Image (tube, coloured by chain):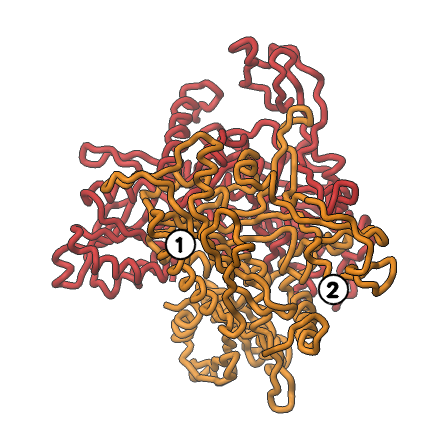
Chain colours: A red, B orange
Amino acid sequence: MIDTTPGGPDTRRRMSIMDKLVALCAHRGFIYPSSEIYGGLNGFWDYGPLGCELRTNLKQAWWQRMVREREDVVGLDSSIIANPQTWIASGHVANFNDPMVDCRECKRRFRADQIAGEVCTEHKKRPLSECPLTEPRAFNLMLQTQIGASEDHSTLAYLRPETCQSIFLDFRRVMQSSRQSPPFGIAQIGKAFRNEITPRNFIFRSREFEQMEMQFFVPPDAAMEWFEHFREYRFGWLRDVGLRSESLRWHEHSDDELAHYAKVAYDIEFQFPFGWQELEGIHHRSDHDLRSHSEHSGKDLSYTDPESKERYTPFVVETSIGVDRCMLALLCDAYREEEVRGDTRTVLGLAASIAPIKAAVLPISKKLAEPAKKLATDLRRRFNTDFDVTGAIGKRYRRQDEIGTPYCVTYDFESETDKQVTIRERDSMEQVRLPLDSVATYLTERVLGF
Amino acid sequence: MIDTTPGGPDTRRRMSIMDKLVALCAHRGFIYPSSEIYGGLNGFWDYGPLGCELRTNLKQAWWQRMVREREDVVGLDSSIIANPQTWIASGHVANFNDPMVDCRECKRRFRADQIAGEVCTEHKKRPLSECPLTEPRAFNLMLQTQIGASEDHSTLAYLRPETCQSIFLDFRRVMQSSRQSPPFGIAQIGKAFRNEITPRNFIFRSREFEQMEMQFFVPPDAAMEWFEHFREYRFGWLRDVGLRSESLRWHEHSDDELAHYAKVAYDIEFQFPFGWQELEGIHHRSDHDLRSHSEHSGKDLSYTDPESKERYTPFVVETSIGVDRCMLALLCDAYREEEVRGDTRTVLGLAASIAPIKAAVLPISKKLAEPAKKLATDLRRRFNTDFDVTGAIGKRYRRQDEIGTPYCVTYDFESETDKQVTIRERDSMEQVRLPLDSVATYLTERVLGF
């Protein structure tokens, strides 16, 4: 068992991996602080050239498995700002609060449930738990704005704190226009915002983030069966995009963790360098959401089975994962340092399906740039391809290893006559020699899977 | 020449096409009003199952041409909310205003430059231009919010009204981490928000929208050459995703339209049913943006050429298009009604690359569902595939025509013995008979282009 108590030796070793990862992300163009030249903004991050490719691939992999490969799930892309009644009906206006305390010494504000490990800045090193603190007060986490032509004619509106509510609002429209009926699901990927009191742990808890959620609408008596189906289905996907099973564990919500409407809820937790934390939730939400929006809107959101004539409000099985924290989990699990012939190489062992760059074409000499570039141009029609002609070949391999590129294609002087190139695989570092005209097919099969 | 003056006969014919398109979009699941069960919210829209597939394909097609096919452009995905200094430096806090007038009779508010065609609701049918109006007042279009733990400790922040500013902020970071140097570009797709006084024309002018922007950083003396390159490049892309050249025209900004920093600016306009309107801008922004952010942040955003040692602030050539209005243009251009053997069919003639569904597998009888479904499952690994077993085959063809599916694959009783299927192309309605095991390759070539 690894000791990950705060301050313990294993936490220190692991935190140093975290520091290295943050540095690699900034240096190689995965993740930067937002608006850094103005001092940044706490809880906001930008994704650089490699970060946004990784993000796109991750979202595509989720969409492929959750929507395109299934006949019974369709997609939705709803607005971030909706009619504010949405958030009254959902209970967020009244209840989406964090308990918050102020330190009477340093005047800073903290989540009451997160003061462990924090220190007072007025009295250096004094643990916050030994400080005089105010009583906890409720603090609503939704960001507000005003919509409309002027302050006196405007409407108070909210930036959504989660993507699922608009799925409930559009349930009937989607069902009718896509000719689906329960059991069926609606999936959505989109941004959400929470005014977190203490954003922390890099991109794990930020104020602007992206969710990938799927709500599956079922007859009440089929809910538990579908719940079990999606537990297995989602765990399988996390493994397929590259997370190790030993980095994942199940956490069942105990009675006092369960939302009042939920029958049963499981989280999949990931062992981040800063400890086990929630990565994905698979929750049985009963008919709470549709019933609540039906009552508030006066619109009928029930369903009548055309054969049995049974009328019911569908139950919802939800799967919900954050793009940003999934990305962080993938980076943490993929990062490794290896000894290779007396040298250390850093590798991001990302699955080929989500790696930002699928293949790098590396001419062994600048004299070979032209024919090698022709190959790169051909590959780019199929998947993201890098082309690099600068520096020693070993150094170029290392650079691709560090950003997770699964295949390097080396074009050498022999290629000119034998029309073959060398393909090097990132993890095994094994090389194969292949005819030029079979490279596209060989790589497509390995990085796109067909 | 088509007469599209407001109220003219051609506008009326075209507006009826617009009405039909809006109805089709709601009925088939392309576009719905946001939070419709609560009465919606003016200027906000949701994209249904087919709408979000079309959107995704459109964004992918742009990204493929602007980033992945080019060695000299890299991507960025920045936060919607950034340090508020960004918008002071950019001039948006001071100047991003619309002139606004109030009607003294009906008390409604209008953009001063958009009162043509509007009527006073107090005195029915009286044109607003004949009403008593207030003097124009400046109205800032940025949506505001508060970030931070409490009202007394919080920071006023803005939802970005355009995506390009964060590209300027991250210019140095991106250049360093991606080993690029001028001439090179940074591309981004993302949401932006504007508190439009009068959202209108379906998704053409909404308050929440998405932009696809690319800023290309060049030595000052190369700016005009790159400007011309991107004018041609962008026009070519619009043609390739399916817009007709007769629906597009160039509009050069006259001296009084030009922003004070711009040297030259062209818009590509599209002939919407409601008239010619801006679709995309290709603008020469000089060194205005980098210079301004450099001055406000105190950070050096200049570049020194390593060979000539020349130091300069790069000039920017920008291409900027809205996802939503591009989608609307594609739908308008694609929509047609045809007489086919005494019957009328509605067709969305979308390019295969952006069509929401690439192929529909249609077993001729429910008895053939199983083997046909096997084919559909195989195709789904490559591209979005529908499966439909309900109703007469002619009716199923019409349904796919109406949502723009380029290929229908019919599995019939003969398929069981000859292992062949019939592929019908949407526009020509021509059919070919092909071996089952060549269908994936045949369609991949046509819908993915390789």
Q: Which mark is residue B117?
A: 2
**Residue A220 or residue B230, whichever sits in front:** B230
Q: Label 2: state its secondary structure.
A: loop
Task: State the residue in front, B190 or A349.
Answer: B190
B137 relative position to B411: left or right: right
Q: Dot 2: few (<14), some (14–19), or many (≥20) neighbours within 10 Å? A: few
Chain under callout 2: B
Q: Is residue B202 above or below residue A392?
A: below
Distance of mark 1 from mark 2, alpha carbons?
42 Å
Q: Quadrant of the C terminus of chain A?
A: bottom left
Task: State the count of labels.
Answer: 2
Q: Position of residue B391 (x, y in %)?
A: 64, 78
Q: Quarter holding the N terminus of chain A?
A: top left
Q: Relative to residue B196, is residue B27 depicted above or below?
A: below
Q: Quadrant of residue A9?
A: top left
Q: Image check: A219 left or right of B358? A: right
- Foreground tag (1 vs 2): 2
The image shows residue B26 at horizontal and vertical percentages of 68, 65
Left or right of residue B317: residue A160: right
Residue at 74% across, 64% down: B117
Instruction: Report helix, strand or loop for mark 1.
Output: helix
Q: Pointer 1: residues within 10 angstroms few (<14), some, or many (20+)?
A: many
The amino acid pointed to by label 2 is Gly
Say above or below: A325 vs A318.
above
Image location of residue B349, percent across then percent down: 54, 75
Relative depth, front residue between B371 and B252: B252
Q: Residue at x 69, y 72 (%)?
A: B15
* Residue type of the residue flagged with mark 1: Val
Residue beneath disc 1: B67
